[in-house]
Image: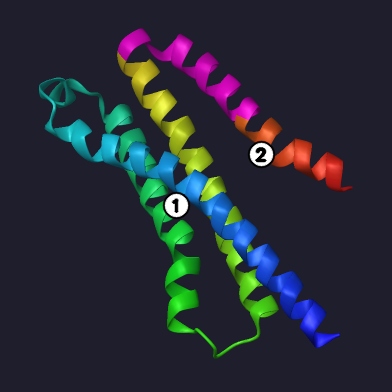
Amino acid sequence: MSEDRDKWAARNMQELLQELRVAQTGVQVLFAFLLTVPFQQGFRQVSTFQLNVYHATLLAAALSVVLFVAPAAQHRMLFGKQDASRLLNRFNRHTIGGLLCLGAAMVGAVLLVTSYLFGPTRAVLTTAVSVAVVLGFWVVSPLVRRG
């Protein structure tokens, strides 16, 4: 029975790491973009609101990177020291948290860019649609399927 559980945990760990590879690429590109934004000449013209959105978006992207990298770092540091299924449960929570932070960072980036380019009305509408799409595909749809 323990061997079957270990095989299950190992297979699920591989699936989780593969999913993380996909998500990490997206958040790393977004984070890199956000790190370059303040060095652009036009960034000096942003409003206080846009500056605050930028700050929150940068922090959400950074936290997403931390949460996505945490499973690899912890797995390496705890290699052979803990039950694989307990690690898998913890890593799953890190991944879900990372995805929520990534979604927040993506929505924040949409809000920042659309408010800068198009003004508040279009920014709010575009951001609301972005929130609905992220929540719909990443949260609501899986929960409906699960429940």
Name the kind of residue labelled 1 in the image.
Ser
Instruction: Look at the picture and state if 47 lies above or below 34.
Output: above
Task: Please identify the quarter of the rendering in which residue 35 is found.
Answer: top left
Tell whether label 1 touches label 2 (CB within 8 Å): no
Q: The residue tagged with tag 1: helix, strand or loop?
A: helix
> Can residue 97 be seen from the camera position used here?
no
Left or right: where does residue 42 sit relative to residue 127?
Answer: left
Name the kind of residue labelled 2 in the image.
Trp
Instruction: Look at the picture and state if 76 lies above or below 54.
Output: below
Decide which of tag 2 and tag 1 comes sooner along the chain: 1
Left or right: where does residue 56 sit relative to residue 12?
Answer: left
Tell me the residue that label 1 is attached to.
Answer: 64
Queried whether the magenta region covers residue 120, the answer comes back as: yes
Left or right: where does residue 54 sit relative to residue 145?
Answer: left
- Which disc is residue 9 wearing? none
Comparing 6 with 112, the one in front is 6
Q: Quadrant of the N terminus?
A: bottom right
Comparing 89 with 123, the one in front is 89
**Most prominent secondary structure in the magenta stretch?**
helix
Q: Position of residue 31 (x, y in %)?
A: 33, 42
Q: Position of residue 99 (x, y in %)?
A: 55, 47
Comparing 1 with 74, the one in front is 1
- Which disc is residue 138 wearing? 2
Residue at the image position 40 percent from the left and 54 percent from the top: 65
Q: Which residues are magenta?
A: 117-133
Q: Position of residue 129 (x, y in %)?
A: 59, 20
Label 1: few (<14), some (14–19) or many (≥20) C-alpha neighbours in 10 Å:
many
